Image (spheres, rainbow, N blue to C red):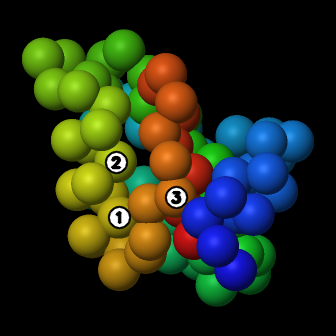
Amino acid sequence: MSDQQLRKEAHDLDVTVWVGKSGIEAVVDELADQLDDRKLVKVKFLRAARGGTSTDELADELAEAVNADLIETRGNTAVFH
């Protein structure tokens, strides 16, 4: 599937993973488990997680940590495949 098709599918998804003050390390296992069960997972980066880092940087780090594709980031939310 193309990224554009995946973005369309992700539009109506609910956020199922929240990254908070514990950082991305705290959600790596959960995100990996969810990606095993479904094609797309939407992740929200809370203000406490971002600190001085951008959502794009955190999303890239998280994608690398779980060996997933980052489909898009919009605001403080990212979609992984």
Q: Which amino acid does label 1 sit on?
A: Ala
Helix, strand, or loop for circle 1? helix
- Label 2–label 1 contact, CB within 8 A: yes
Under circle 2, the secondary element is: helix
Q: In this view, does 1 lie to the left or right of 18?
A: right
> Whole-percent x and y of residue 46?
44, 22
Badge 3: residue crowd in 10 Å (few <14, some 14–19, many ≥20): many
Q: Nearer the viewer, residue 63 or 32?
A: 63
- Residue at horizontal 50%, vertical 48%? 72
Circle 2 residues within 10 Å: few <14, some 14–19, many ≥20: many
If you read the primary sequence from the N terminus, does the residue marked by circle 2 or circle 3 appear first? 2
Which residue does the image show at 43% across and 31% down from the upper left?
Answer: 45
Above or below, 34 relative to 13: below
Which label sits in the foreground, 3 or 1?
A: 3
Q: Say left or right for 9 vs 29.
A: right
Q: Name the residue under label 3.
A: 71
Q: Earlier in the sequence, mark 3 or mark 1?
A: 1
Q: Nearer the viewer, residue 52 or 7?
A: 7
* Image quadrant in which the C terminus is located: bottom right
In the displayed structure image, the side of residue 56 where residue 43 appears, left or right: right
Q: Which residue lies furthest to the bottom in this view?
A: 36
Work out whether 34 lies above or below 53. below
State which quadrant residue 27 falls in. bottom left
Picture disc at residue 63: 1
The amino acid beneath tag 2 is Ala
Residue under label 2: 59
> x, y (%) of residue 43?
55, 44
